[in-house]
Image (cartoon, grey):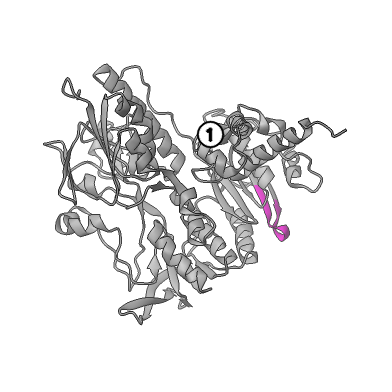
Amino acid sequence: MSPRPGRPLRIVVVGFGPVGARFAEEVAPGVRDGSLQVTVVGQEPVDAYNRVLVADHAVGSTGLADMTLVSAEDLARDGVRVLRGTTAMQIDRETWTVELDTGETLPYDRLVLATGARANVPTLDGVDRRKRDLPALEKYGRSLLLSDHDLPRGVCTLRDLADADAVAEVVRSGGRIVVLGAGVLGLELALSAARAGADVVVVHHGPTPMPRNLDRGGGSVLAAALRAAGVEVIAHSRAEAVGHRDDPAGGRHFDALITADGKRITGDLLVLSCGVSARSDLAILAGVRVGSGVLVGEDLSSWSDERIFAIGDCAHVLAPTPDLRRERIVPGGPSGLIGPGWRQAEWLAARFLLEAAAGGPPLELGPPPVERPSTVALKAERVDVVAVGDVQAEPWDVEPTTADACSVHPAAPRSVSVWADPDHGRYVKMITRAGVLTAFVCVGMPRTAAELTLLYDGGGELPADRSVLLRLDGPDAIGGASAEAFAPSTTVCTCNGVTVGRIMDAAQSGSTTVACIGKATRAGTGCGGCTGRIAAVLERVADGDRQSEPVPA
C-alpha cells in the first residue's frame, strides 16, 4: 500500500462537511511539509458548516458565518485543494481514480469517504421515494448522485441551506409548518419556528416524542412542554399521504398531510424529520461492501479495498470476522453523532501523517478509541432535555438473570431512581449499577442534567441520596453544580474534548462569549449541547475577574 518513492501520498476526500473538513485540517501539516497531497471534493458550493445549526439558521437566530467550521481559503493557504460545488461520480478501483462531474479525474493512493448522511423520505402517496440500490444507481446514477431527493414544492428535509431558506420563507410570513417526526432535530426546528412566530404542528406515530431517547415519563413531560411552548403535537398518527394544491408558479405545492386515521393536517410547508441514512452510493457503484453504511474495520479501512476509508455518518464500523463477511445483513451502523465522526477524522489523519513520514503503515498507532453512548440534548429556549443510554427500565421491573450489565460493574444489580413533577415540566430518571450512572433522562432540570452528564462522562458514583442532585435546580440552589463541574480537567465539550481549563485560558485571553470560545477552542461547535456549560464557565471567570478588581478609594 505504500506510495511510489519520491512523491507525496495522494489523498482524495469525498465530502466537505464537518467530518471531511476536520480531516483536512488535521492532515494539513503533512501538506505543508510536502509528504501529503490532499484534494477535498464538496458537493455544496459553500464552506463546511455545522448542520446541527440549520434549524437556528432557518429562523434567523444563527448566521452562516457562525455556522461555518472551516473555509476553503484557510485550507488552500495550507496547500489543501478544495473543490466546492463539485460531485464525485465514480470510483475506479483498478486505476485508483475518482471521476468528477466536471470531467476531471483525480488519482489517489488513499480515498477517504466522508459523504455523511441524507434525510430519509418515508413512504407517502404523493411523494416520490427514490431507490438507491445497485440496479437503480446503475440506471439513474448521475441524477441520483447529483441530487438527494426530488420533492414536491412545499416539502423539504432540513438538511442543507436550501431547506433552511424554505423554512425561513414560511416563518417570515407567519405561515403553518407541519413537522413529520418527533426526533431531536425536528423538535428543535418546531420550537425555534414557533418562537419566531410560525404556526407549528408536530405529527408522529408513537405515543410520545423522542422515543429512541426517552422513556414514557420523560416523553410525556416533554410533550406537555412542547404544547406550553406553542407547538401543537399530534401523536399516534401514522402519515399515509400528501395532498397538493395548484401552485401559482406552476406545478404542485404541498397542501396537507393525511394520516391513516383520517386526519388532514393542512400547512404551507411539510418538513420531513424521519431520521437519516448513510450516503453509500459511490461505494455501492464501486462494488465496495456496505451495511448501514460503508463497512470498515476498526482501522476505518473498507472491508473490500484497503485503499478506501470511511469516516463520520457514512462509516459503519464493524470488525470483519469470517462469519460476518458471509452474512448478508450485519449488526450495528453509523453513530449518527458529530463527536465520534470528528474523533475518527483526527485518528485517521494521524495515521496518514505517520504513514507518510514512515513510508508505510504506522505500527505504533493504536486503534481509534472505543466510543461510549453519547448524551443527546434537545436545545431550545425553556425546554431542556438531556438523555443517554437505555432508559426504559422502571424501578419495579425485575431484572432478568441475563442482564445487560455495564462494563464497570458487570455483576452489580441495576438500580432505578425516578422523580417526576409533570405540573412544572420536570422529570429525572437515573439508572445505576453499584452507584455508577449507566443511563439517565432529564427534562426541565438543566443544572441536574449538567451534573449527571459530568458523572456519566467521568464514570463517577452518584451520591447515596439521589435527591441531592435534584436540589441543583431548586430555588435555594447556590452556585449551580458541584465544584467538580469547574475543575480544570473536567470535560465541557465532549464532541471536541475541550476542558474547563482550556475554556478558562481562552476567556482570560479575550474570548469572552460562547461564539468566541467556539472559534478559539472548537467547544460548542458540535452538537451544541454544551453551550450552557460554556456560558457557566465564562460567568465564573467573569465573577473571578470582578472580585479581583481593586476597590475604589
Q: In this view, does 504 lie above or below 136?
A: above
Secondary structure type for disc 1: loop
Using the image, determine if residue 220 lies above or below residue 487: below
Asked whether 80 or 533 is in front, the reply is 80
328 or 543, nearer to the observer: 543
The residue drawn where x is 36% and y is 63% is 122
Question: Is residue 167 shown left or right of residue 226?
Answer: left
State how many labels appear: 1
Q: In which quarter of the image is the C terminus?
A: top right
Looking at the image, can residue 464 be seen? no
Image quadrant in which the N terminus is located:
top left
Left or right of 58? Residue 118 is: left
Magenta span contains residue 287: no
Quarter of the image holding residue 32? top left
Asked whether the viewer can see residue 173, the reply is yes
Residue 438, percent from left and from top:
57, 37
Type of amino acid under label 1: Ala
The x and y percentages for residue 481 are 71, 38
Position of 4 relative to 219 (above/below): above
Q: Residue furthest left?
A: 94
Q: Name the residue under label 1.
A: 405
Give the magenta part as a residue range.
420-428
The image shows residue 392 at horizontal and vertical percentages of 56, 48
Q: How many neighbours does mark 1 have within 10 angstroms: few (below 14), some (14-19), or many (20 or more)?
A: some
- Which residue is located at x 29 percent, y 68 percent? 128
Question: At x 64% / y 58%, what residue is drawn?
Answer: 221
